[in-house]
Each structure stands twice: as C-alpha cells, then as structure tokens.
Image (cartoon, rainbow, N blue to C red):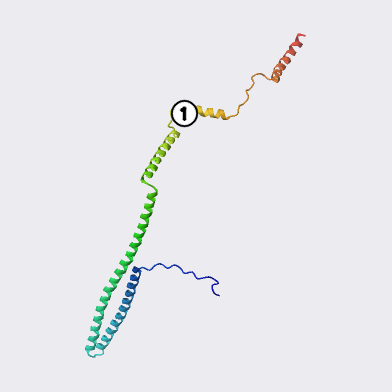
C-alpha cells in the first residue's frame, strides 16, 4: 500500500554514554563469572561423590586422592571468582553513583544559571527599594488599624460623630415644615361641644 499511512515515526532514543557501556560490560562479566561458579560447584560436588564412591568400593585411594586434589583446586578458583565478583560489583556501584553525581551537578549548573538570570533582572537596589516600600506600606496599614481599633481621643470621636451626622443630614431629602396652626376641622370640633353645653342652660333659663 506504499506510503498510505505515511512514514513510521521513530521514537527518540537516549544517548548511550561511555559510562553506560562500561557498566553494561561489567554486568556481563559478572553474569559470566556467576555461570562459571555454578559449573565449578557442580563439578566439585560430582568429584567429591566419585571419590567417596571409590573409597566405599574398596578401590585404591590414588584416584580418589586425585579427585580431591582437583576439588581443592576448583575451590580455590571459586575464592578467586568471589573476589572478582566483589570487585566488579564495587566498580558497577561506583560508576552508577558517578552517573548520579553527574546528573546532580548538571542540575545544579542549570539552577545556578537560572538564578544568575533572575539576579540580572532584579538588582540589589531594586530589592532594597521593594523592601523599603513594603515596610512603609505595613507601617501605614498599622496606623489605619490603630485608628479603627479605637486609638482616637474623645475629642476625635466627637468630631467623627459630628461629621457622620452632617453626612446623614445631607444625604436625606428635605422635608416640608410641619404647620403649627390648627386646622379648620379641629376648630369646628372645639366649638361643637360648647354649643351643646349652652343649650341646657338656655332651657333652664326659660
């Protein structure tokens, strides 16, 4: 179908360093030594069993002695391979730890470069100015908080209340004045009882 689906994208591979190759080679040598130890252990067990069988069958001990000598030599080889394995393990550990240290150093280098760029953008004078402005702002806010928390004198409180009353008066709409004169209806109500009281007096007089 040709390039119907386009070219296959290859995933980016991480760069293999010389340290990585060295660690890999050391681990391969370690694995080979372990396989070699397995063979030697197997051969030692086999030779020991054959020597035991020869002595049990009443045969001459010369061949059994030869097998035991061979076994002893192979055991010395095992000790040597143990030392080699220990050295390889230590070297693998050192290389891997050196790689970690290298990554840490790279991270520190990047961090230092970033800090330098930040310091270039913000000078020491700028920092001192910001800190001074911050102190001034904090002191001003503290003064406001002190005033709001009751730090005024009695005279100041009276002035504040008077100003508050003035603001309230100005904010209210003007109301018409309340008339003090009596209404006509009220006057008639006051006259009516007097007329009723005078009628019985007139009847008695007649």
Q: Which residue is mark 1?
A: 157
- The quarter of the picture where the C terminus appears is top right
Q: Residue furthest right?
A: 206
| Above or below for 18 versus 202 | below
**Residue 198 to residue 43: above or below:** above
Residue 157 position, x and y percent, is 46, 28
Image coordinates for residue 134, horizontal then vertical, percent: 40, 41
Write the residue at 38% across / 52% down: 117
Count of numbered circles on the image: 1
Q: Nearer the viewer, residue 141 or 67?
A: 141
146 is higher (above) or lower (below) than 130 = above
Dot 1 alpha-carbon crowd within 10 angstroms: few under 14, some 14 to 19, many 20 or more: few
Most foreground residue, 126 or 158: 126
Going by the image, does 52 lie left or right of 169?
Answer: left
User: Image quadrant for the N terminus?
Assistant: bottom right
Residue 96 lies, in percent from the top left, at 33, 66
Q: 20 or 126, which lies in front?
A: 126
The answer to which quarter of the image holds residue 194 is top right
The spot of residue 165 in percent (x, y) is 53, 28
The residue most toward the top is 205
In the figure, residue 129 lies in which quadrant? top left
Nearer to us in this view, 100 or 5: 5
**Residue in view at x 30 percent, y 66 percent:** 94
Rendered view: 84 above or below 70: above
Tag 1 secondary structure = helix
Which residue is depicted at the point 29% across and 82% down?
Answer: 43
């Amino acid at each position: 179908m040709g390039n119907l689906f386009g070219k296959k994208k290859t995933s980016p591979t991480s760069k293999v360093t010389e340290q990585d190759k060295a660690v890999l080679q050391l681990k391969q040598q370690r694995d080979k030594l372990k396989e070699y130890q397995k063979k030697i252990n197997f051969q030692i067990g086999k030779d020991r069993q054959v020597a035991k069988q020869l002595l049990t069958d009443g045969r001459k001990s010369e061949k059994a002695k030869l097998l035991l000598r061979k076994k002893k030599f192979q055991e010395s080889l095992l000790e040597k391979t143990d030392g080699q394995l220990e050295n390889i393990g230590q070297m693998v550990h050192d290389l891997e730890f050196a790689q970690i240290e290298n990554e840490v150093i790279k991270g520190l280098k990047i961090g230092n470069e970033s800090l330098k760029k930040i310091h270039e953008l913000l000078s020491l004078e700028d920092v001192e100015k910001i800190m001074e402005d911050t102190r001034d702002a904090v002191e001003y806010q503290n003064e406001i908080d002190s005033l709001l928390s009751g730090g005024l004198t009695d005279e100041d409180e009276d002035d504040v209340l008077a100003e508050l009353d003035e603001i309230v008066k100005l904010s209210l709409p003007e109301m018409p004045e309340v008339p003090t004169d009596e209404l006509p209806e009220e006057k008639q109500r006051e006259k009516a009882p007097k007329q009723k009281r005078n009628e019985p007096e007139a009847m008695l007089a007649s």
